[in-house]
Structures are given as structure tokens and as C-alpha cells.
Image (cartoon, helix red, strand yellow):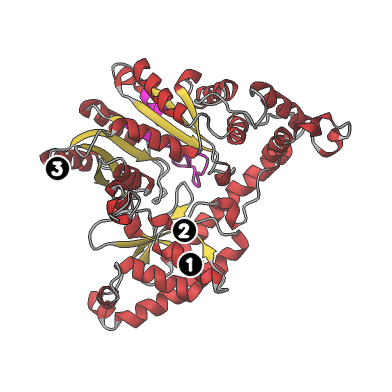
Amino acid sequence: MGLKALDYETMNENVKKVQYAVRGELYLRASELQKEGKKIIFTNVGNPHALGQKPLTFPRQVVALCQAPFLLDDPNVGLIFPADAIARAKHYLSLTSGGLGAYSDSRGIPGVRKEVAEFIERRDGYPSDPELIFLTDGASKGVMQILNCIIRGQGDGVLVPVPQYPLYSATISLFGGSLVPYYLEETANWGLDVNNLRESVAQARFKGITVRAMVIINPGNPTGQCLSEANLREILNFCYQENLVLLGDEVYQQNIYQDERPFISSRKVLMDMGPPISKEVQLVSFHTVSKGYWGECGQRGGYFEMTNIPPKTVDEIYKIASISLSPNVPAQIFMGLMVNPLKPGDVSYDQYVRESKGILESLRRRARIMTEGFNSCKNVVCNFTEGAMYSFPQLRLPPKAIEAAKQAGKVPDVFYCLKLLEATGISTVPGSGFGQKEGVFHLRTTILPAEEDMPEIMSSFKKFNDEFMAQYEDNWNRSRM
């Protein structure tokens, strides 16, 4: 018998090329250690509920009623569920074609897409068309659908910020395209320099790559920066000049931990710029229920909105969405509830505000504890997390540590993160999984562990780090003074 189609040697090469560090070697080792009984703190994935963030009460009440509509017929339902949750459950059930167990339109329930469009209009001050909004199983599915439409083959490139969230590198590999990196400037708080973009495009073209799209992650993952309005204008101008589609990954827009740079959507800045740019630049924006103070990762709810995409293309994207028949229906209800939140005067409003504010304020404090904790460690430097839910400290590894990593057959920051995991149970992601400049090392951790556990986590990190640095340092530091 010869090789079969699903033997490793003959399977699709693009699948084998995919690398996804967030669930890579470190995560697998952490899972092994957990099975052996070691206490592991999984800070490798932005998975808020897994690290103890409590779900918001109101959306769970509404979806519970939608999942079990017979409760609505119970005369005592009002004793357990508030009146606004009951009303909202009836509203969403009336929008479905047979409850949560029935497929919806492949683009998502029209009534929920209308709520998303109204949210976008309130946020940006410009009308939004529900026909150009598709609901998806988390933002990731939407990103994959759009990249699938853009990438025609190896000759097509997509500009991606480095460090980047590996969804992009993995998906571009899977679809057989070429990733064109543009480097963010760590010393400028992970800012973006348009000259870097021009250079990246020129280099790609020199290699025969057609650059077709650009990705921005705002607020940044793993870097946590918020793009300023001026930066967004530069980016949109650049896309206009170079004829690129802009993919705006804006899933962390609720996660802002400072007041100087609020979140501004790419779409608002595009519309503010006026014609011809506002009529020309093709933009696809992504959002999710997985992040922010919702943190409903496991529900898999997201959307994308298309701006300046021709109707024929929208029809083709609809056709591709139809292959999966329907996005997850309960998640669409979560999305409706997120974009159409409670209003002052609603019975559950005060509790909703108390819960969501409590989560955001705690995250803001945790961002500070973590940044300060990292900056107090030997040979570790960390920018403040302005937004999103990650810290991305730089590790200044001594030459002896780099040599020891080489001996062990590991990339230096993977070597460091594995040692950290074994010593402390803290599971992080090495910076090499996101891309970084040559000879520079980082790790990514979420800021999600419970606030009361944070001082202990940071002190065990510091103890490990300072011992690690001392072990491999010898005279290195003295020679650098």
C-alpha cells in the first residue's frame, strides 16, 4: 500500500506551515505539568472567564431564557428573572426563525445586524448599513473569511504589524499567501512609522509580491498600544496611495486603561477625512463579544463591517458564508446585547454598570501592577499597557543564557519561558511567537489573573527572573555599566 491522502507526508503543505504560538510548545508543556498536579496559571490566552472574570449577569439571563423559552411560560418567571431580561429574551426570540436551535441567515439575524449598525452609528457619528455587516463565530472566523477572499496565491502579500497576533501569520500561511511584516517601534510605545510601511512594501515588491491589504490591531495585541487619530489618518492615506484594503482588528475597543488616547475606530477617521479617500479606501472592521468586560470567548460571537466594498464582492462573501449555513445563534444574541446595552432607568441597569465598571477598573489597576512589576525586574523593560489585555515585556537576556538556549536547541525566549513555567507554573507565550526584531526577546502575558493574586504572581515572576539573570549573567552586567 502506498501513502494515503491523510498521511503526514502527503497532506496539504500549507497546513503544515501553520504555526500558532498561543497554543504551541509552552501551552502543551503547561498542560502536561497540570496533569502531573502542578498548579498552572494560564496567562497565554486572552481568556478572561478561565482566569476568574465573572460573566455579566444581564446577558446571561437573557440568553438563558432564549435557550429555555418554556421558562417564559412559567407564571413564576418574574420572581427569578428581571422584567427587562424577560422583555429582551422575547424580543430576540421574535427575531429568530424558530428559536436558538434554528439556523439563521448566513450573514446573521437581520434584527441583530440592525442593532450592530445602530451601535456603529452612535459610536462614529456616521450611518452604517446592516446589509454590509456579517455576524461571525468570533472575529477570527471573519478575519479568515476576508483573507480568503484577498489571497489568490503566494504572490499576494498582506502587511501585518510585528509583533502580531498569530491568527494573521497562521491564516496567511494556510491560504498560501505571503506575510509582509512592518515593525512597530518599541521605544516609541509601539508606535507605527509610515516610512517603515513604505520600506516593507518596497521590499515585498522587489521580491515580486503584490501587496493587497494591510492589517492594524487597535488596541494592539500583544503590544497594548492605542493608535492616535493622527496615526490612523497616516495609515488610511497610505492605503489610499498604495491601493490597499485595510483590515481593522478592533476587538479590544472596550479595553482602554488610560484617558489620553481613547479608542477611535478606523471607520470614523476614514469618514472624517471626506472624499475622495472616504469613498475609495476599502475597509473591513472586526469586533467580538470575547474581549472587553464581556469576555465571552467560549460563545464565539463576532461581526465584520465592510466599507466601500463593491456589491458584487459582498455577494461573493455572502456565498462563502453560506457554506457554513449559519453563524452560532446564541452568540448572535450576545452580540445584540453587547451593541444594544441597557439604558438608564432599566431595572437591571445599575447592576450592569456596577459589574462592567468593576471589571474595567480592576483591569486598569492590574495593567499598572503588571507594568510596574516587570519594570522592577532585572533586565526587563515594559511599556505601559494602554489598551487590550496583555503585557509584552522585553527580556534583555545575557549572552550565556542565549548560549544555553542554543545548547538546548531552543529559541532564547522559549528557553526562558519554559524555565519560568517549570519554576513558577506561570504559562506565557514567548515573543518569538508574535515576531520581533532580530536579537530582541520578549514574552506575552495577559493582565487577566485575579487582582488579589496579582502581587503573588508578580513576586514569583521577579524571584524567578532575578535568579535566572544572576545565574547566566556573571560579569556581563558589569561590563555594560
Q: What residue type is labelled 1?
A: Ala
In x, y percent, where is residue 28?
A: 45, 64
- From the viewer's perspective, is the residue at label 3 or at label 1 nearer? 1
Q: Alpha carbon of mark 3 to alpha carbon of mark 2: how far?
A: 33 Å
Query: What stretch of residues is rendered in magenta?
Result: 246-270
Q: Residues within 10 Å of mark 1 (few under 14, many from 20)?
A: many
In this view, 267 is above or below 352: above
Q: Name the residue under label 3.
A: 203
Q: Is residue 64 magenta?
A: no
The answer to whether residue 396 of the structure is visible from this angle is no
Q: Main secondary structure of the magenta part?
A: loop
Q: In which quarter of the image is the N terminus?
A: bottom left
- From the viewer's perspective, is the residue at label 2 or at label 1 nearer? 1
Q: How crowded is mark 3: few (under 14 residues within 10 Å), some or many (20 or more)?
A: few
In x, y percent, where is residue 177?
A: 25, 40
Q: Quadrant of the C terminus?
A: bottom left
Disc 3 to disc 2: CB gap under 8 Å = no
Residue closest to the eye, 416 or 109:
109
Q: Determine which of the numbered discs, if any, sits on residue 258 in the image.
A: none
Whichever of labels 2 and 1 marks the residue nearer the N terminus, that label is: 1
Q: Mark 2 points at which residue?
A: 44
In x, y percent, where is residue 466?
A: 41, 76
Q: Identify the secondary structure beneath mark 3.
A: helix
Q: Alpha carbon of mark 2 to alpha carbon of mark 1: how far?
A: 10 Å
Q: Does the magenta stretch include residue 267?
A: yes
Disc 2 to disc 1: CB gap under 8 Å = yes
Q: In percent of the image, x 41 and y 40: which residue is there?
A: 218
In x, y percent, where is residue 293?
A: 58, 44
In terms of image quadrants, where is residue 235? top left
Q: Mark 1 points at which residue?
A: 30
Q: What residue type is labelled 3?
A: Gln
